[in-house]
Image (tube, rainbow, N blue to C red):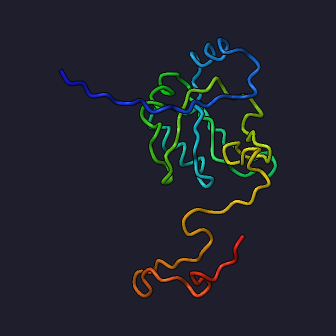
Amino acid sequence: MAHLWVEEETKIVYQDTKFQGDGDEMDRLKSISSTLYVGNLKYTTSEEQLYELFSKCGIVKRIVMGIDRFEKTPCGFCFVEFFERKDCLRAIECLSSTKLDDQVIRCEIDHGFENGRQYGRGNVGGQRRHELPKYEQGRKRHGGGRGDRDYDWDRSRKRGRYSDSYKPGNRDRY
């Protein structure tokens, strides 16, 4: 008999690195929580958009936008609190890996919002995932593919031609 083997994709699970309890305490709090961590938001996503989306799963108690602790600007995550846990679980089931603002979002159960968690935990105020690892800091970054070249994709006139500011072969070597 033939069987279809499907490899499970590894799932990234959000963890609050500042949590003061142990793993059992975290699991206990998550088992009764009605709070979601929503990640991978565009910086331009508004609270109104989030209310509109998540209220389809139940009555939203509040939304706390994640902000850069220095700049006080959105940094790509939020917490959504529902009045009832069943609505929170429905939101995870229905909305995780869906698109909001042309961006695939992540929804995960959270142990509960506490003041101060709205600030990004990165060294520069935002999220850690947007920062370079220590071994990369200070290294010059070069983009892949076309790099910093100015490529004009205007299909009507110059399809596939480089702009005047870039000529192949006339670039500085590192």
Residue situated in front as seen by the camera: 65 or 58: 65
Numbered label tally: 0
Q: Is residue 102 left or right of residue 115?
A: left
Farthest residue to the left: give it. Answer: 1
Vertical placement of residue 41 versus 95, above or below:
below
Answer left or right for 62 relative to 162. Answer: right
Give me the residue at 75% from left, 42% from top.
122
Pinpoint residue 11: horizontal percent, then vertical percent: 51, 31
Picture layout, residue 94 above or below residue 149:
above
Closer to the camera in the image, 90 or 123: 123
Q: Quadrant of the C terminus?
A: bottom right
Image quarter (top left, top right, bottom left or bottom right) of the N terminus = top left
Instruction: Residue at 58% x, 62% y: name it.
Output: 144
Write the residue at 57% across / 30% down: 13
Lateral position of residue 173 relative to residue 3, left or right: right
Judged left or right of residue 1, residue 63 is right
Q: Quadrant of residue 167?
A: bottom right
Instruction: Tell me what residue is drawn at x 76 percent, y 31 percent.
Output: 115
**Which of the 4 quarters of the picture holds residue 90?**
top left
Q: Position of residue 79 (x, y in %)?
A: 62, 35
Percent position of residue 104, x then y: 49, 46
